[in-house]
Image (tube, rainbow, N blue to C red):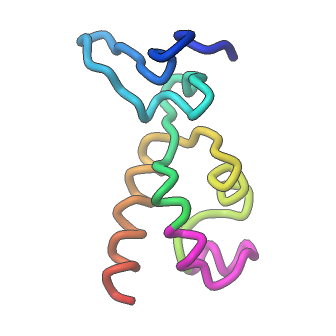
Amino acid sequence: MTPLFSGPDRKKRIDKRGAVTKKMIDMHGIAAPKGQTFLDPEVVEMMKRLATGQTDEALNDRFGISYNTWRKLVAGRAVRHSLAQRLTERVAVIAASC
């Protein structure tokens, strides 16, 4: 993967409608594959605080994800849009109940 832009504009991406979307670009300016996005780093940090364990079973019980997905999130790799949306909502609910 190569950066879309260089210099100060490298974190910006212009979609087909002309809107700049930052979720589709990681911190190094690399675009996510089609149909995927990067989860907000703040959500990942909140997940780390809320996690009851880092086993497949604990992660599945708490967030509904596998250990492999957890490793992707922690490494800052792209995940499916639907997964990112579901996790963001689920983490907000869990955080509100704590």
Given residues 98 and 16, the one toward you in this image is 98
**Residue 64 image position (x, y, % from top left):** 54, 69
Q: Is residue 94 above or below residue 71?
A: below
Residue 69 image offset from top left, x and y in percent: 66, 55
Specify the quadrant that holds the N terminus.
Answer: top right
Split into 4 quadrants, where in the image is the C terminus?
A: bottom left
In the displayed structure, does residue 3 sit left or right of residue 13? right
Report the magenta stretch's main SS. helix
Residue 28 is situated, as x and y percent measured from the top left of the image, at 62, 28
Q: What stretch is highlighted in magenta?
A: 46-61
Q: Residue at horizontal 39%, vertical 59%?
A: 88
Q: Magenta segment: does it hold 70?
A: no
Dividing the picture into quadrants, the one containing residue 56 is bottom right
- Residue lying at 63% horizontally and 45% vertically, measured from the top left: 76
Drawn side of residue 77 relative to residue 21, left or right: right
Residue furthest out toward the bottom: 98
- Image quadrant assignment for residue 44: bottom right
